[in-house]
Image: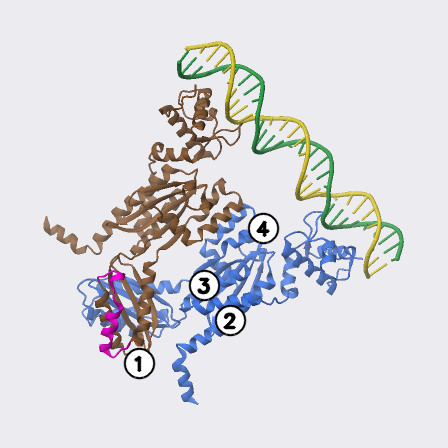
Chain colours: A brown, B blue, C yellow, D green
Amino acid sequence: MGNEHMDSRKRAILRAVIEDYIMNAEPVGSRTIAKGHDLGLSPATIRNEMADLEEMGYLIQPHTSAGRIPSEKGYRLYVDELVGDCELSINEMKKIRDALDNRINNFSDIIKIASGLISELTEYTTVAVTPSMNEINLKAVQVVPVEAGKVLVFVVLENEALYNTLVNVDKNISASDIINISHVINQEMAGKTFDKVYFEKIENEAVKFNMDYEMIRPIMSGILKCLKNAETAHVYTDGTINMLNHPEFSDIIRAREFLEMMQHEDKMLKLITENMTDGGIMVKIGTENTFDEIKDCSVITATYSVNDTVIGSIGIIGPTRMQYGKVISSMNAVKNSLNTYIVKLLEGSDGNDKKEEQKGNE
Amino acid sequence: MGNEHMDSRKRAILRAVIEDYIMNAEPVGSRTIAKGHDLGLSPATIRNEMADLEEMGYLIQPHTSAGRIPSEKGYRLYVDELVGDCELSINEMKKIRDALDNRINNFSDIIKIASGLISELTEYTTVAVTPSMNEINLKAVQVVPVEAGKVLVFVVLENEALYNTLVNVDKNISASDIINISHVINQEMAGKTFDKVYFEKIENEAVKFNMDYEMIRPIMSGILKCLKNAETAHVYTDGTINMLNHPEFSDIIRAREFLEMMQHEDKMLKLITENMTDGGIMVKIGTENTFDEIKDCSVITATYSVNDTVIGSIGIIGPTRMQYGKVISSMNAVKNSLNTYIVKLLEGSDGNDKKEEQKGNE
DNA sequence: ATTAGCACTCATTGTTTCTGAGTGCTAATA
DNA sequence: TATTAGCACTCAGAAACAATGAGTGCTAAT
């Protein structure tokens, strides 16, 4: 009787149950499996196997006279060993191409576009995080006179990210003084990361242009504001209300709780970045997630990099009853398209001369 | 019998019904009115009056054995003639002060802060629109060299709004050429509104610095991008999920429909700006609104100005069963606080020299 | 003109019954 | 020995029904 070993037939049945449940959100009975997937087994045999799978903890019976639904353990096995690749349709590939083709202007938008794309492809909710720019070198830090008493401070990072702010300064500072101090600042800061910058040095230098600490303080605090902005991870969400399409959230209380949580950037940040593994795709099922509000959800996270620099991570949130195969495939597809696209982009603008060099080398 | 004339007693009863319904979201019966508000009338009398009010179209009876609820006509009369001012609590005044005190850095954030504030005070959903900056004069338009082949273009408006973008240019253009062209551009543009600017003039001038059209085109398109950005009205929403607290939206279909609509910026823009009257506060009840999705909602809109310049409009969306008095009072309170605060702000920074000028004129 | 009294209405709530999808077990079958 | 047909059993959810009570409109008394 009850052979409590996980043979390939049990795996096939488990897979069938899970995929059926993912499709229909209703407990799956032996008859359904027997009819739908031709495993060449009668309902009775399947029933026996399902009883075994329940005893082993992979399936759950909501009540005696119902079919089975997967347990978290069941989903885990499915994700780790059973789920198959899911090829994207031509239409979906087109969507990816179109999204990348027209819209990317600067690097900081990439992660937003990618997450919007994935959200559209999968019809789940996405959370995207632009990482802290701590590690990126400053390309330029400049102060530009706008009018008497008003200057623009801007910071450009190596990865083209741009931060700036308008600052009020003493009206007696002349435009040429501003330009001088701008040189000093840029000299000290360009090419370094944030934490390698010494504000004292700048202050000391400033004295040479008849500027005391009080005069440049607004400028320095403007720069600090920019750096602060660059240091903070930014969180975007997309397709939030997609979640309401799933029967799991047809209860308004649940729905409200979910939407509420989505508004907490700190929680989202933690959710997506926690236990991050580089490169790969991570799946957290149900209570494997930190927050109680999504104990019936799964989160699938991927890190996106360009030239070995992480430009952000994207997480998909959906019910535990989620189309794992499709989501994972979509994330990979976007990742790949993004990579090839970026390479082209770099060749096209920065790399104009590089291309010529290459030609010359041939 | 049924005296079909709108005497003050009918008005008092109508008001009582409406305010009860606004509080409890349940049909109001004659007994409740007789007990709750001491009008010195028996339930029977109130019943008669209510029957009259129904015949006149101000009240509706959902079914024979239920109390009455207000009709749109009822709400309209209430808003136009019956609603009383609602003084804000000390706590609420404090909230307003706190919000304004710490957070305002630049003018473009004001409307965002104000709408967040109103959303918090009223616990409804707010939509805020920053108007098109078409009418505002340009204060400065500059191009700054960042590195070979890369320049920063920025536009500052008279009202301190700042727009900018990083642009790739021909690597052979020298930094001093950039500075020259920047002067030309600024000369032509500063002090004018968008539509008064002539790009041809700039192009003609540019030739003098050995720059042809092709060389400055990326710069001009960068500027165009900034202007475009300034021209577009921006829409922000706040407290969207507040709506889900009201029983009118306990149905997930309704809730979903509402959230869906909130995502359409164009609809929101139309909703808030349509039939805009300057200065005052406008109330649109139920089907008076353009969109079918909110036929059971009311929208209350106010325009916010600083020194006769409209800086944005804010709309509150709530169920028709909305606390009209409270919302209108809150909007006015924020408006007033904002005004006095801004005046102080201007005196503090921009206004320094203006004050001196005025003194000189005396 | 107002109000007490009363019969009437009907949404809501609770109770009971019915139905059917799905089960586990046993005995027959390949 | 593994599989399957057959059958009694379970139980959530739908459907049918009854009870409750808040609220009404009307009539007659104040």
As drawn, the label of residue A103 is none
Rate crowding at label 2 as few (under 14), some (14 to 19) or many (20 or more) other CA atoms within 10 Å.
some
Image height of A65 relative to A356, above or below: above
Q: Are marks 1 and 4 on the same chain?
A: no
- Write the residue at 35% across / 67% down: B162
Image coords of residue B186 (percent x, y):
29, 73
Q: Which residues are magenta?
A: A191-212
- The residue wearing badge 3 is B112
- Write the residue at 37% across / 38% down: A326
Residue sitting at the far bottom: B362
Q: CA distance from mark 1 to mark 2?
A: 33 Å
Q: Is residue A151 visible?
A: no
Q: CA distance from mark 1 to mark 4?
A: 60 Å
- The residue wearing badge 2 is B337
Rate crowding at label 3 as few (under 14), some (14 to 19) or many (20 or more) other CA atoms within 10 Å.
many
Q: The N terminus of chain A lies in which quarter of the figure? A: top left
Please report, as a chain letter, where disc 4 is located.
B
Q: CA distance from mark 3 to mark 2?
A: 15 Å
